[in-house]
Amino acid sequence: MDDSSRTAVVATYLQLSEKGGSDPHAFTVAVDVFRCRNPEVSRTAAAHTVAEWVSDALGQ
């Protein structure tokens, strides 16, 4: 996975969250963005990666 994927995924999550979207919805959309860019990755693996990236971005 390249840096542009990470940037797109994290930006998607943050933008949806900041606009009042629920965290589960923002997370689901971020996973969908990840999978569009990396279709070979399973949904489960994508969710784990997105969770890690978002957590890093939020400093958690």
Image: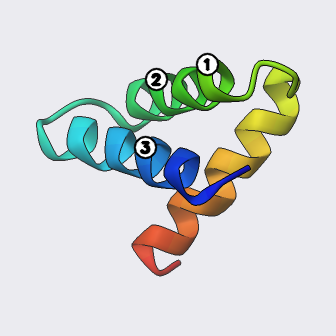
Mark 3 or mark 1: whose residue is earlier in sequence: 3
Name the foreground residue: 50 vs 5: 5
- Amino acid at the residue labelled 1: Cys
Residue 38 pos. (x, y %): 73, 28
Kindly report which numbered mark, 2 or 1, lies closer to the viewer in this rendering: 1
Q: Which mark is residue 36?
A: 1
Figure label count: 3
Report how far apart the C-alphas of labels 2 and 3 lie in the structure: 11 Å
Is disc 1 placed on a helix, strand or loop?
helix
Report crowding for label 2: few under 14, some 14 to 19, many 20 or more residues within 10 A (C-alpha).
Answer: some
Mark 2 or mark 1: whose residue is earlier in sequence: 2
Are the residues tagged 2 and 1 within 8 Å (C-beta)? no
Are the residues tagged 3 and 1 within 8 Å (C-beta)? no
Q: Which mark is residue 29?
A: 2
- Amino acid at the residue labelled 3: Ala
Q: Is residue 33 above or below residue 51?
A: above
Report how far apart the C-alphas of labels 2 and 1 lie in the structure: 10 Å
Is disc 3 placed on a helix, strand or loop?
helix
Residue 2 pos. (x, y %): 66, 54
Are the residues tagged 2 and 3 within 8 Å (C-beta)? no
| Colouring | rainbow
Q: Residue at x 35, y 38 (%)?
A: 12
Kindly report which numbered mark, 2 or 3, lies closer to the viewer in this rendering: 3
Residue placed farthest to the left in the image?
19
Q: Relative to residue 15, is residue 51 drawn left or right?
A: right
Mark 2 or mark 3: whose residue is earlier in sequence: 3
Give the residue pinned by disc 3. Answer: 8
Residue 30 pos. (x, y %): 49, 33
Q: Residue at x 67, y 23 (%)?
A: 35
Report crowding for label 3: few under 14, some 14 to 19, many 20 or more residues within 10 A (C-alpha).
Answer: some
Q: Is residue 10 above or below residue 17?
A: below
- Amino acid at the residue labelled 2: Val
